[in-house]
Image (cartoon, grey):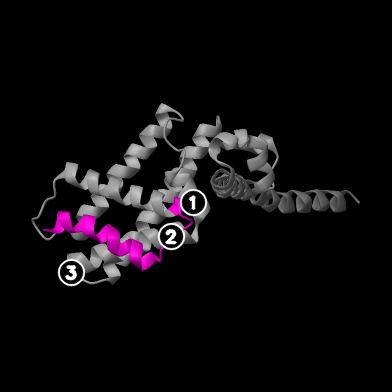
Amino acid sequence: MTIYIVTYNLTTLIFRKPMATETTSKRPYRGTAARERRAQRRQQLIDAATEVYGHNGYRHSSVKQVCDAAGLTQRYFYESFGHSDELLIACYEQATRRLREHNMAAAEAAGGDPLARCRAMLRSYFQELKDKPNVARLLLIDIRGISPAVDRAINDALRAGIQNMTQALARPGQTFDPMLQAGIQGGFIHIALYWMATGYAQPVDAVTETALKICAALLE
């Protein structure tokens, strides 16, 4: 009887060790899963806010509206963002980054001629604005003057756009006047604003060709 009890206890101890090791091995996984869920919730808020801000305007949108659209409670908003301006900046940076990526991909697909590349970039830009009117409103309407932090994000995006312009259109060893580039970029924006105000009345190709006239000053 005594021998049986000792054998049982030893067997129990032997089987407990792998269980402890297994529990320990799961800890990093649980931590990673928690971070992934938090990142997913953050992305849900950004995607929802892009639509809510684009539809209502940032100044007429609330945290509750964004959380409702994301399918999350308001406590998850403060898990990722200190205030609404931070969420607006995250939306703006994501939208501008994706737009630049689309434009650069279009330029690469157009070949090596700078004029063809410029036309492709502009067409991509205007097509994206038309296809995603909420994003267009987020990027171009009522975005200035919200806060110094938002203005800095806008200026950073404009500088990145100028860098993309140089990367896509300049020939080897060629440089562009940055002030001229800024003026041309502003021209594109104002053409887009006018086009949006008309309800996208003109075809994308027609708007592209109009904007290309401005870009020609850079390529001369």
Type of amino acid at the residue the image marks with label 2 = Glu
Q: Secondary structure at mark 2?
A: helix
Give the magenta part as a residue range.
Answer: 196-220
- Is residue 83 visible to us here? yes
At which x and y percent is residue 8? 82, 52
Q: Which residue is mark 3?
A: 113
User: Which residue is rendered at x = 25% and y = 60% of the image?
Assistant: 212
User: Which residue is rendered at x = 59% and y = 50% of the image?
Assistant: 29
Q: Main secondary structure of the magenta part?
A: helix
Q: Is residue 202 magenta?
A: yes
Residue 155 against residue 20 in the figure, above or below: above
Q: Which residue is mark 1?
A: 135
Type of amino acid at the residue the image marks with label 3 = Asp
Type of amino acid at the residue the image marks with label 1 = Val
Label 2 vs label 1: CA separation? 9 Å
At which x and y percent is residue 99? 39, 55
Q: Which residue is mark 2?
A: 128
Considering the image in quadrants, where does the C terminus appear? bottom left
Q: Secondary structure at mark 1?
A: helix
